[in-house]
Image (cartoon, helix red, strand yellow):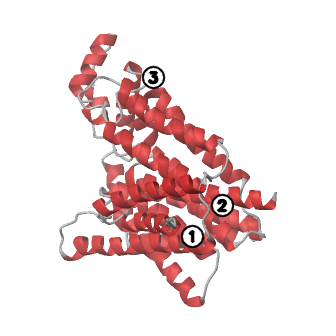
């Protein structure tokens, strides 16, 4: 009997995953599972698993292991967060599968186009709820949820669109549509008012423009002027971010309680330094719990210095509290590894438009995750998945390129 080639099904599942990520809950989960199943079946049949074991495999598996170690050995609470650990498992496996895949250039352009279009269409639905039906208070993506997480996702897609537009590939119509998408995503980030996503976006734009200026041997004042114009135009059209910042200054909450949340995280890791309080258990830390910790350590409990929430609004402090030093080290190892790879493998002036686009999109996903992680709990659910897809694709392409040149 003739074997059925499931390569197309694997790619269609990846496209579906990217298409449904910001929009619909059930279809995106089905697409993720199908992609991983088809990937395993195809590799089993071909006996080609994407090359020998590498440091990336070890780092990704350590990231997954750190999450499950927290669930198994973290503080004893009825729910130790297996669901949250499963989230890390899913995006870790997606990263491993994508990095060990070979994609044709045509498919990668299609994948990026689907990611951008899906986000824009979902944003239109968000605007409908915000401006027409008035059922929304903040602009968000339907399946991503909270405005901060929606803004993180939008920021990653914005970096993808900007990197593609900067590569100047395609017809005039295609390039125009790309820049329209860039403008829509940029303005939508200001409409969302999520400063924790806007700050890393600005950092990314500056880094990307400086990198391109060096690559193309152009003057540095031009990218700086472009950033100033982009910021000025967005603030003029959407002044809400400035007003929100001004209000926070007046109420002495510029950091929106993040320092107080960080103190809670530090108290938690003092009690459970190795594996933390258990992944997803930050929400269970309340004044009564902290008061007990303080009494046990002989210190006075002062609730005015603390703030309690469902998470620490920081990737690093949240991971430190929930997964302990073991979990934090695995996250840092992964992010530092991506950052060093971006620095070492940055494209030259002779690089192709695809190489420039992939590097720029990866730089954006990394900055949004790593720098944005100071202000928000990044590397979480949908925006973790899209970031891992981008990381995996870029690393796969660099591996393929080096293998071909060798």
Residue drawn at x 73%, y 61% as measured from the top left: 401
Q: Residue 31: give x, y in percent of width and height.
A: 38, 61
In the image, what residue occupies the spot 65% across and 42% down?
53
Front residue of 181 and 290: 181
Residue identified by numbered label 1: 108
- Give the quarter of the figure containing the C terminus: bottom right
**What separation in Å lies between label 1 and label 2 (alpha carbons)?**
10 Å
- Place of residue 213 in the rendered image (x, y in percent of width and height, measured from the top left): 71, 67
Report x, y in % for residue 300: 29, 16
The quadrant where residue 69 appears: top left
Dot 1 or dot 3: first in sequence order is 1
Of helix, strand and loop, which one carries label 2? helix
| Label 1 with label 2: CB-CB less than 8 Å | yes
Taking depth in this image into account, of 14 and 34 the one nearest to the observer is: 34
Residue that mark 2 sits on: 397
Q: Mark 3 or 2, which is nearer the eye?
A: 2
Q: Which residue is rendered at x = 32% and y = 63% of the image? A: 27
Residue 281 visible in image? yes
Q: Which of 198 and 233 is in front in this view?
A: 198
Looking at the image, residue 354 sits to the left or right of residue 318; the answer is right
Residue 211 or residue 157, whichever sits in front? 157
């Amino acid at each position: 009997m003739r074997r059925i080639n499931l390569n197309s099904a694997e790619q269609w599942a990846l496209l579906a995953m990217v298409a449904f990520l910001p929009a619909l809950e059930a279809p995106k989960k089905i697409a993720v599972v199908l992609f991983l199943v088809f990937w395993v079946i195809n590799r089993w049949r071909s006996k080609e698993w994407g090359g020998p074991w590498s440091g990336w495999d070890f780092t990704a598996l350590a990231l997954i292991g750190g999450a499950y170690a927290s669930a198994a050995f973290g503080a004893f609470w009825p729910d130790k967060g297996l669901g949250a650990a499963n989230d890390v498992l899913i995006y870790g496996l997606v990263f491993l599968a994508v990095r060990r895949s070979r994609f044709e250039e045509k498919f990668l352009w299609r994948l990026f186009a689907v990611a951008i279009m899906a986000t824009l269409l979902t944003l239109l639905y968000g605007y409908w709820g915000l401006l027409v039906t008035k059922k929304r208070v903040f602009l968000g993506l339907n399946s991503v949820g909270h405005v901060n997480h929606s803004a993180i996702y939008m920021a990653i897609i914005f970096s993808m669109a900007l990197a593609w537009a900067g590569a100047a590939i395609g017809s005039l119509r295609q390039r125009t549509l790309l820049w329209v998408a860039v403008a829509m995503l940029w303005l939508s980030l200001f409409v969302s008012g999520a400063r924790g996503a806007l700050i890393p976006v600005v950092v990314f734009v500056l880094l990307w423009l400086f990198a391109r200026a060096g690559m193309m041997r152009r003057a540095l004042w031009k990218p700086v002027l472009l950033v100033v114009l982009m910021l000025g135009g967005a603030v003029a059209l959407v002044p809400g971010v400035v007003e929100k910042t001004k209000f926070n200054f007046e109420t002495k909450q510029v950091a929106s309680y993040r320092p107080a949340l960080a103190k809670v995280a530090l108290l938690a890791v003092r009690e459970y330094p190795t594996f933390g309080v258990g992944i997803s258990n930050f929400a269970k830390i309340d004044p009564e719990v902290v008061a007990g910790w303080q009494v046990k350590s002989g210190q006075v409990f002062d609730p005015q210095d603390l703030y309690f929430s469902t998470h620490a609004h920081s990737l690093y402090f949240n991971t430190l509290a929930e997964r302990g030093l073991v979990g934090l080290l695995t996250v840092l190892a992964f992010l530092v590894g991506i950052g060093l790879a971006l620095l070492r493998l940055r494209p030259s002036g002779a690089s192709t438009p695809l190489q420039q686009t992939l590097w720029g999109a990866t730089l954006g996903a990394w900055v949004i995750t790593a720098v944005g992680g100071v202000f928000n709990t990044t590397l979480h659910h949908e925006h973790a998945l899209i970031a891992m897809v981008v990381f995996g694709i870029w690393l796969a392409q660099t591996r393929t390129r080096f293998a071909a040149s060798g």
